[in-house]
Image (cartoon, helix red, strand yellow):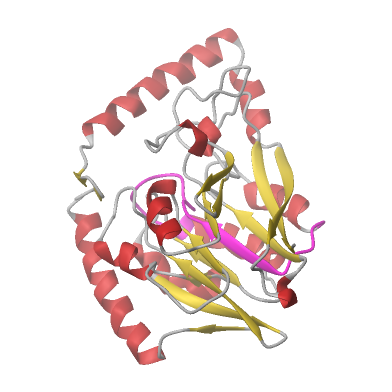
Amino acid sequence: MYKFINDPEIRKDRRLIWASTRSVLENLEFLRNKNGKKSRSHWNLFVRLLNIFAVLLKIIGYYRKGYGNAKTIKVSEITIEYPNLPTAFDGFRVLHLSDLHIDSIPGFASIINTKIKKLTFDICFLTGDYRRDNSGSILQILKPFKILSKYIQAPFGTFAVLGNHDTYLMAQYENQSGLELLVNESVEIIKDGQKILVTGTDDPFSYYTEQALLSLETRGYDFKIALVHTSELAKAASASKYDLYLCGHTHGGQICLKDGYPLISHQFEGKSFNHGKWKIGKMIGYTSRGVGVSGMPVRFNCPAEIVLITLKKV
């Protein structure tokens, strides 16, 4: 079972304040990270370069191969050991999905389901970016999410945070999507009388506010998990003694050189955060390569992944 740490009325008031703030940021295109206001010019240039690259891929005959790669999803199974993990959670299995961009490829929800329905897990976490575009309608992702929802419902809950491709309007469709949205909020996961804490923040890449940082200032738990779209809040989470930090955003590069080195990662914390497991202090983090694709529906030398983490007590 799970329980939000704040009273329902407090959560309701805070959610209204958050929705008001983020709606203004989205409508005014006031993109902001921890370092201040972001320019859209870099993104617009990136989109133009992508369009040119897509034409080149089609000319040389590689586009179809890349499209096939994008529909091929790998399940990455890892085990992470902790001395402070409550004994009730020894062997607890976490399903981590990130960057679905579920409307980028027709029928993509069913492709994902063929992988997930073979897995067993106790809890499911989604770390943002559910639609293809940065703006516009979200109605096109509701049906695919309903298809996906059947297989991601977990015994201890299915929780999600928003990414930079998402909108505050998604909060209105929590029931239809089968997700419990965490917006700068924390929830207790309770098993056999023992607890762990899960905190989810709003997207820090384009819609950063101080509330994201404040939500990580939690105390009183033996084991804590942070869900953030990017690795940008990892140092803050480590300072607040979180044990596991799950994020995505980079797609692992999506288009990489043969050694897996990304041409573009859209993150500035360092190459160790591009993909896979990393560590800050005692906190272990994992950056997913993502399930879906962004910009164009191709992947090279960077397979999409669904991550299944087993927590072990040592």
Residue 72 pos. (x, y %)? 71, 36
Examine the rendered structure and indicate whether residue 16 appears above or below residue 69.
Answer: below
Q: Quadrant of residue 257?
A: top right
Examine the rendered structure and indicate whether residue 29 appears above or below residue 171.
Answer: above
Residue 93 versus residue 81: which sits nearer the camera?
Answer: 81
Which residue is painted at 23% across and 70% down in the image? 20
Residue 111 in the figure: left or right of residue 8: right
Residue 134 in the figure: left or right of residue 272: left
Which residue is painted at 46% across and 51% down in the image? 129
Tell whether position 130 is magenta.
yes
Which residue is painted at 31% across and 68% down in the image? 214
Residue 180 pos. (x, y %)? 52, 73
Tell whether position 47 is magenta.
no
Residue 280 pos. (x, y %)? 49, 48
Range drawn in magenta: 118-140
Figure quadrant of the C terminus: bottom right
Q: Quadrant of residue 35?
A: top left
**So how many labels did they put on this image?**
0
Q: Magenta span: helix, strand or loop, mainly?
A: loop
Figure quadrant of the N terminus: bottom right
Which residue is painted at 56% across and 38% down in the image? 275
Examine the rendered structure and indicate whether residue 152 appears above or below residue 42.
Answer: below
Q: Quadrant of residue 215?
A: bottom left
In the displayed image of the protein, which residue is found farthest to the right?
118
Residue 231 versus residue 54: which sits nearer the camera?
Answer: 231
Residue 303 pos. (x, y %)? 65, 33
Examine the rendered structure and indicate whether residue 134 appears above or below residue 181.
Answer: above
